[in-house]
Image: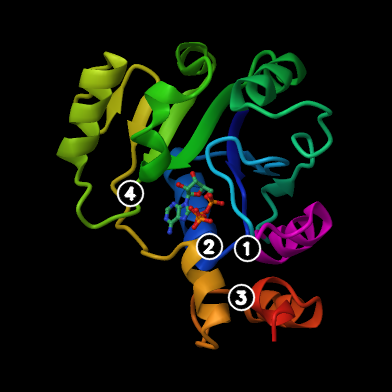
Amino acid sequence: MKIGIFGGTFNPPHKGHARMVEKMTEELGLDKVLIIPNKIPTHKRCDDLADNKDRIAMCKMAFTKPKFEISTMEMDRESDSYTIYTVKDLRKKYPNDDLYLIIGSDMFYIFHKWYKHKELLEECTVCVASRNTDDNIQSLRQYAFEKLGVYIDGLDGKNIHISPLDAYIVSSGEIRERIDEGKSLYGIVEPEIIEYMEKNKLYGYGKK
Ligand code: ATP
Protein backbone atom coordinates (compact mmCIF):
# COMPACT_ATOMS: atom_id res chain seq x y z
CA MET A 1 0.00 0.00 0.00
CA LYS A 2 1.14 3.59 -0.64
CA ILE A 3 0.50 5.69 2.44
CA GLY A 4 0.74 9.49 2.55
CA ILE A 5 1.60 11.39 5.73
CA PHE A 6 0.51 15.02 5.88
CA GLY A 7 1.31 16.82 9.11
CA GLY A 8 0.69 20.43 10.00
CA THR A 9 -0.46 22.90 12.56
CA PHE A 10 -3.71 23.38 10.61
CA ASN A 11 -4.41 26.55 12.58
CA PRO A 12 -6.84 26.70 10.78
CA PRO A 13 -6.82 24.31 7.80
CA HIS A 14 -7.47 26.07 4.48
CA LYS A 15 -8.09 25.30 0.83
CA GLY A 16 -4.34 25.46 0.05
CA HIS A 17 -3.82 22.44 2.34
CA ALA A 18 -6.77 20.49 0.94
CA ARG A 19 -5.98 21.23 -2.70
CA MET A 20 -2.33 20.31 -2.26
CA VAL A 21 -2.95 16.98 -0.51
CA GLU A 22 -5.75 16.03 -2.90
CA LYS A 23 -3.55 16.65 -5.95
CA MET A 24 -0.60 14.84 -4.36
CA THR A 25 -2.82 11.82 -3.58
CA GLU A 26 -3.79 11.63 -7.24
CA GLU A 27 -0.31 12.31 -8.60
CA LEU A 28 1.38 9.68 -6.42
CA GLY A 29 -1.48 7.16 -6.60
CA LEU A 30 -1.75 6.97 -2.81
CA ASP A 31 -4.10 4.43 -1.24
CA LYS A 32 -4.50 6.21 2.07
CA VAL A 33 -3.41 9.53 3.57
CA LEU A 34 -2.99 10.22 7.27
CA ILE A 35 -3.64 13.86 8.14
CA ILE A 36 -1.77 14.51 11.38
CA PRO A 37 -2.32 17.78 13.26
CA ASN A 38 0.71 18.67 15.45
CA LYS A 39 0.41 18.85 19.18
CA ILE A 40 3.14 21.40 19.80
CA PRO A 41 4.51 23.02 16.68
CA THR A 42 8.20 22.21 16.68
CA HIS A 43 9.25 24.33 13.71
CA LYS A 44 7.35 27.40 14.76
CA ARG A 45 5.42 28.84 17.66
CA CYS A 46 2.29 30.93 17.51
CA ASP A 47 0.32 32.91 20.13
CA ASP A 48 -2.96 32.29 18.43
CA LEU A 49 -3.05 28.48 18.48
CA ALA A 50 -6.52 26.89 18.60
CA ASP A 51 -7.12 23.95 20.96
CA ASN A 52 -6.45 20.40 19.80
CA LYS A 53 -10.16 19.57 19.74
CA ASP A 54 -10.92 22.58 17.53
CA ARG A 55 -8.11 21.84 15.10
CA ILE A 56 -9.26 18.21 14.86
CA ALA A 57 -12.86 19.30 14.25
CA MET A 58 -11.77 21.74 11.53
CA CYS A 59 -9.50 19.12 9.89
CA LYS A 60 -12.50 16.80 9.63
CA MET A 61 -14.30 19.53 7.68
CA ALA A 62 -11.31 20.39 5.49
CA PHE A 63 -10.08 16.92 4.51
CA THR A 64 -13.12 14.98 3.43
CA LYS A 65 -11.96 12.53 0.74
CA PRO A 66 -12.58 8.85 1.64
CA LYS A 67 -8.85 8.08 1.46
CA PHE A 68 -8.11 10.67 4.15
CA GLU A 69 -7.94 9.76 7.82
CA ILE A 70 -7.39 12.32 10.58
CA SER A 71 -4.90 10.94 13.09
CA THR A 72 -4.35 12.25 16.63
CA MET A 73 -1.14 10.25 17.05
CA GLU A 74 1.03 13.36 17.53
CA MET A 75 -1.45 15.09 19.80
CA ASP A 76 -1.72 11.94 21.90
CA ARG A 77 2.04 11.68 22.37
CA GLU A 78 3.22 12.72 25.85
CA SER A 79 6.48 14.30 24.74
CA ASP A 80 7.27 16.95 22.18
CA SER A 81 6.58 15.53 18.77
CA TYR A 82 9.08 15.19 15.96
CA THR A 83 8.20 13.85 12.54
CA ILE A 84 10.80 11.08 12.83
CA TYR A 85 8.93 9.63 15.87
CA THR A 86 5.70 9.61 13.88
CA VAL A 87 7.32 8.00 10.88
CA LYS A 88 9.02 5.34 13.04
CA ASP A 89 5.68 4.51 14.71
CA LEU A 90 4.01 4.24 11.31
CA ARG A 91 6.86 2.08 10.03
CA LYS A 92 6.15 -0.39 12.88
CA LYS A 93 2.46 -0.39 12.03
CA TYR A 94 3.02 -0.67 8.26
CA PRO A 95 6.33 -2.58 7.88
CA ASN A 96 5.87 -3.45 4.20
CA ASP A 97 4.20 -0.33 2.87
CA ASP A 98 5.64 2.72 1.13
CA LEU A 99 5.47 5.92 3.15
CA TYR A 100 5.25 9.34 1.48
CA LEU A 101 5.80 12.44 3.57
CA ILE A 102 3.96 15.38 2.00
CA ILE A 103 5.28 18.88 2.69
CA GLY A 104 5.13 22.39 1.25
CA SER A 105 8.28 24.04 -0.12
CA ASP A 106 8.67 26.35 2.93
CA MET A 107 9.19 23.23 5.07
CA PHE A 108 11.43 21.62 2.45
CA TYR A 109 13.83 24.58 2.41
CA ILE A 110 14.53 23.99 6.12
CA PHE A 111 14.48 20.20 5.88
CA HIS A 112 18.23 19.91 6.61
CA LYS A 113 17.46 21.43 10.04
CA TRP A 114 14.74 18.89 10.88
CA TYR A 115 15.53 16.50 13.71
CA LYS A 116 17.11 13.31 12.24
CA HIS A 117 16.30 14.36 8.71
CA LYS A 118 18.71 11.81 7.21
CA GLU A 119 16.85 8.96 8.90
CA LEU A 120 13.58 10.43 7.68
CA LEU A 121 14.90 10.37 4.13
CA GLU A 122 15.67 6.67 4.55
CA GLU A 123 12.24 5.80 5.91
CA CYS A 124 10.04 7.64 3.45
CA THR A 125 9.86 9.56 0.20
CA VAL A 126 9.60 13.28 0.80
CA CYS A 127 7.11 14.86 -1.63
CA VAL A 128 7.33 18.60 -2.06
CA ALA A 129 4.67 21.00 -3.31
CA SER A 130 5.44 24.56 -4.25
CA ARG A 131 3.94 27.30 -2.06
CA ASN A 132 5.32 30.23 -3.85
CA THR A 133 5.42 31.34 -7.47
CA ASP A 134 9.16 32.09 -7.09
CA ASP A 135 10.26 28.64 -6.02
CA ASN A 136 10.63 26.90 -9.31
CA ILE A 137 11.67 23.31 -9.77
CA GLN A 138 15.28 24.34 -10.43
CA SER A 139 15.65 26.05 -7.04
CA LEU A 140 14.12 23.03 -5.24
CA ARG A 141 16.57 20.75 -7.08
CA GLN A 142 19.47 22.99 -6.16
CA TYR A 143 18.48 22.97 -2.49
CA ALA A 144 18.19 19.15 -2.51
CA PHE A 145 21.65 18.81 -4.02
CA GLU A 146 23.45 21.41 -1.91
CA LYS A 147 21.89 20.76 1.49
CA LEU A 148 20.74 17.14 1.32
CA GLY A 149 23.20 15.68 -1.19
CA VAL A 150 20.39 14.33 -3.37
CA TYR A 151 20.59 14.77 -7.13
CA ILE A 152 17.18 15.22 -8.72
CA ASP A 153 16.78 14.29 -12.34
CA GLY A 154 13.49 15.67 -13.65
CA LEU A 155 11.16 15.56 -10.67
CA ASP A 156 12.63 12.60 -8.79
CA GLY A 157 15.77 11.84 -6.81
CA LYS A 158 16.54 9.24 -4.17
CA ASN A 159 13.51 9.43 -1.84
CA ILE A 160 12.58 12.96 -2.93
CA HIS A 161 9.79 13.88 -5.33
CA ILE A 162 9.00 17.39 -6.53
CA SER A 163 5.41 17.95 -7.56
CA PRO A 164 4.82 20.00 -10.72
CA LEU A 165 1.67 21.42 -9.12
CA ASP A 166 1.23 25.21 -9.31
CA ALA A 167 1.34 27.13 -6.05
CA TYR A 168 -1.94 28.13 -4.43
CA ILE A 169 -0.90 31.06 -2.31
CA VAL A 170 -2.68 31.10 1.02
CA SER A 171 -1.53 30.46 4.60
CA SER A 172 -3.16 29.96 7.99
CA GLY A 173 -1.37 33.11 9.18
CA GLU A 174 -3.02 35.14 6.42
CA ILE A 175 -6.39 33.70 7.42
CA ARG A 176 -5.91 34.65 11.07
CA GLU A 177 -4.91 38.15 9.95
CA ARG A 178 -7.95 38.47 7.69
CA ILE A 179 -10.20 37.49 10.61
CA ASP A 180 -8.54 40.15 12.80
CA GLU A 181 -9.10 42.72 10.08
CA GLY A 182 -12.71 41.64 9.45
CA LYS A 183 -11.94 40.65 5.84
CA SER A 184 -13.74 37.94 3.88
CA LEU A 185 -12.46 34.34 3.84
CA TYR A 186 -14.62 33.46 0.87
CA GLY A 187 -12.90 30.96 -1.44
CA ILE A 188 -9.93 30.25 0.84
CA VAL A 189 -11.60 28.44 3.75
CA GLU A 190 -14.52 25.98 3.69
CA PRO A 191 -17.78 27.78 4.70
CA GLU A 192 -18.41 25.14 7.37
CA ILE A 193 -15.05 25.99 8.97
CA ILE A 194 -15.82 29.72 8.89
CA GLU A 195 -19.07 29.01 10.76
CA TYR A 196 -17.23 26.81 13.25
CA MET A 197 -14.60 29.49 13.95
CA GLU A 198 -17.28 32.15 14.44
CA LYS A 199 -19.40 29.96 16.69
CA ASN A 200 -16.45 28.88 18.83
CA LYS A 201 -14.91 32.36 18.90
CA LEU A 202 -11.58 31.23 17.52
CA TYR A 203 -8.78 33.65 16.56
CA GLY A 204 -10.05 37.18 15.92
CA TYR A 205 -13.68 36.05 16.33
CA GLY A 206 -13.03 35.79 20.06
CA LYS A 207 -11.47 39.25 20.28
CA LYS A 208 -14.48 41.21 19.05
P1 ATP B 1 1.05 29.36 9.17
O1 ATP B 1 0.66 30.45 8.23
O2 ATP B 1 0.37 29.39 10.51
O3 ATP B 1 2.55 29.22 9.27
P2 ATP B 1 0.58 27.27 7.12
O4 ATP B 1 -0.45 27.85 6.21
O5 ATP B 1 1.99 27.24 6.66
O6 ATP B 1 0.50 27.95 8.57
P3 ATP B 1 0.73 24.57 8.24
O7 ATP B 1 -0.37 23.90 8.98
O8 ATP B 1 1.91 24.99 9.00
O9 ATP B 1 0.05 25.81 7.45
O10 ATP B 1 1.16 23.68 6.99
C1 ATP B 1 1.13 22.28 7.00
C2 ATP B 1 1.81 21.79 5.73
O11 ATP B 1 1.09 22.25 4.59
C3 ATP B 1 3.26 22.30 5.55
O12 ATP B 1 4.03 21.27 4.95
C4 ATP B 1 3.07 23.47 4.60
O13 ATP B 1 4.24 23.72 3.84
C5 ATP B 1 1.94 22.96 3.72
N1 ATP B 1 1.14 24.06 3.15
C6 ATP B 1 0.48 25.02 3.83
N2 ATP B 1 -0.16 25.85 2.98
C7 ATP B 1 0.09 25.40 1.73
C8 ATP B 1 -0.27 25.85 0.41
N3 ATP B 1 -1.01 26.95 0.23
N4 ATP B 1 0.19 25.13 -0.65
C9 ATP B 1 0.96 24.04 -0.47
N5 ATP B 1 1.35 23.58 0.75
C10 ATP B 1 0.92 24.24 1.84
Q: Tell me the SS state at disc 3.
A: loop
Q: Amino acid at mark 2?
A: Ser
Residue receiving disc 3 = 190
C-alpha separation, residue under disc 3 versus residue under disc 2: 13 Å
User: Which residues make up the magenta segment?
Assistant: 48-63
Residue receiving disc 2 = 172
Residue in view at x 24 percent, y 28 percent: 143
CB at disc 4 and ligand 1 closer than 8 Å: yes
Residue receiving disc 1 = 12
Q: Tell me the SS state at disc 2.
A: helix
Residue in view at x 32 percent, y 58 percent: 167
Sequence-wise, the earlier of marks 2 and 4 is 4
Image position, residue 133 (x, y; %):
23, 57
C-alpha separation, residue under disc 1 versus residue under disc 2: 6 Å
Q: Amino acid at mark 4?
A: Ser
Which quarter of the rendered picture does the C terminus lie within?
A: bottom right
Of marks 3 and 1, the one in the foreground: 1
Query: Residue 130 bears which disc, if any?
Result: 4
CB at disc 1 and ligand 1 closer than 8 Å: no
Give 182 or 71, whichever is nearer the viewer.
182
Labels 3 & 2 near each other (Cβ < 8 A): no
C-alpha separation, residue under disc 3 versus residue under disc 4: 22 Å
CB at disc 3 and ligand 1 closer than 8 Å: no
Image position, residue 198 (x, y; %):
73, 82
CB at disc 2 and ligand 1 closer than 8 Å: yes
Mark 3 closeness class: few <14, some 14–19, many ≥20 residues within 10 Å:
some
Q: Tell me the SS state at disc 1.
A: loop
Q: Amino acid at mark 1?
A: Pro
Left/right placement of residue 173 relative to residue 128 reads right
